[in-house]
Amino acid sequence: MGAAIAGNLIQIRESFDAATLIGEGKVQELTAMVKGLDASVVIFDRELTPTQLRNLEKALEVKVLDRTQLILDIFASRARTREGQLQVELAQLNYLLPRLSGHGVMMSRLGGGIGTRGPGETKLETDRRRIHIRIQKLERDLEHVKMGRATQRRQRVEVPLATIALVGYTNAGKSTLFNRLTGSTVAADARLFATLDPTVRQMPLPSRRAVLLSDTVGFIRHLPTTLVKAFRATLEEVRQAALLIHVVDASSPLAEDHARQVMEVLREIEAAETSQILVLNKSDLTGESSPDAAISRLLGEEANASRTRAVAVSARTGSGIPRLLQVIDEVLPADPMLETHFRIPAGDGATIHEIHSNAAVERVDYHDEACEIVASAPESLRRRLRDFVVQ
C-alpha cells in the first residue's frame, strides 16, 4: 500500500479536452515524463470521464486514477467498522457503475496497492443488474444504520444531553482535540481521513453541565458526491448537533481555503446555519494574537458575529483548552443553567453527589433530616430531580 511521488505536472488551459482532459500535446509530454521516471501510476487532481480515463490509460500505458478514485481508495483503507465499510463500498460501486460498460481495464483494477482497494473483483465482473442489486442491498443496510442512529439520538434527547460536533478539514487535528477534551484515546495521526467512523463521548463543562462530543469524518475540497451520499447517516450527527466546533489548522498556509471548503460541505448537508465556534488549532505554531479577528479572515462573508466565536488552542499542548470550554458553556444554546433550590433527604447520598457532580453548587445547608442545596443547575438535571426541587 502507498506510493512515492516521482514528479508532478501542472496545466492551465481555457477549456478541458473532451477526449483526454489535457489535450494531445500535454499527453505526449506526460507520456515522456512517465517513461523517464519509470512511473507505474498517474493521478489526476480532477474527476475523469470514462472516455478520458480509457484514452489516457491507452496512451500512457500505465494505471490512471482520478481524484475521486484515489479518495475512495484512501477511504477503503481507513474503514474499520461494518458501517464504514458499507458506506465506502456503496460509494465505490456508485462511482464505478457508469465506468463498467466496455471498460475491462477498470474491472481488473482491484487487487492490491494504490487505486486497487475496491468492493472485490468478483463483484465488478458481474453485470449491471447484479451491481444494482448490491447497491440496493447496501442502501437498505445503511438505512438500518440511519434508523439505529436516530434511535440513539432520541435516547440522548430523553436524557437530555446537548450534542456538539467537531467538524473541519481533514488532518486539522479534530481527533487530537477530541481526545484532549474527553480524555479518550481515539486514533489520531497525520493521515488523510484517519477518522471515518463517528465517535461520541460525554464531556463535562465548567458549569458542570454534561454534553456529548462527536468526532466526525474530515472534509476536503470538492468532496465527491458519491461520498456525501454514502456518508449521509454519519453526517447526520453534524446536522443534528446543537453546536459545531469548526477546527482549522491555523498553521497551514491553506487555512483560509480549508475553512471555506468546510463551510461549503456544511451548506451541502444543510448544517451551515448551526451555531459555530471557530477553533484555531496548532496556535503554538502560529502565535495567533487575535482569535476574533480570524473569523472574517478565515470565513469571510460566512462570518456572523452573532453565531461564530473564535478561540486559539493547541490540542497537542492543551493551551487554550480552558478558554474553549468556557466559550462552549457561554454559547451552547441547549440545556440552560438556572438557579435551583433542592431539598433532598439527608440519607440520599447518591442524589446529593449527582447535584455536586453536575451543577455549580452555591450553598449547602443541613436541617434535621434534609439537605438543602442551592445551585446553578442545567435544565436537564432539574427535570431528572424535579421531585427534589423547591418551588
Image (cartoon, grey):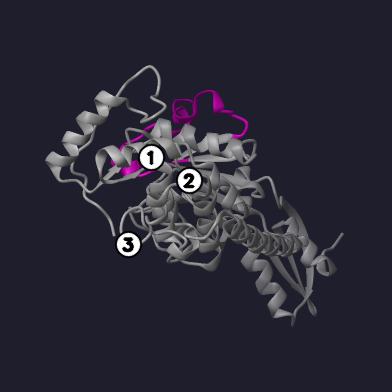
Q: Residue at x 40, y 24 (%)?
A: 16
Residue 112 circle label = 3
Q: CA distance from mark 2 to mark 3?
A: 20 Å
Give the secondary structure at mark 1.
Answer: helix
Task: Label 3: state its secondary structure.
Answer: loop
Disc ID at residue 107: none
Q: Are marks 2 and 1 in contact (CB under 8 Å)?
A: yes
Image quarter hosting the N terminus: bottom left
Check disc 2 and give the amino acid type.
Answer: Arg
Where residue 45 sits: x, y (%)?
36, 36
Q: Which mark is residue 53?
A: 1
Given contact means CB atoms under 8 Å apart, are the residues at marks 3 and 1 in contact? no
Nearest the viewer among 149 and 303 is: 149
Q: Residue at x 76, y 58 (%)?
A: 340
Mark 1 Cα-neighbour bin, 10 Å: few <14, some 14–19, many ≥20: many
Q: Residue at x 38, y 24 (%)?
A: 17
Q: Is residue 324 visible?
A: yes
Q: Which mark is residue 99?
A: 2
**Left or right of residue 133, residue 264 in this image:** left
User: What's under tag 3, amino acid-wise?
Assistant: Gly
Residue range highlighted in magenta: 279-307
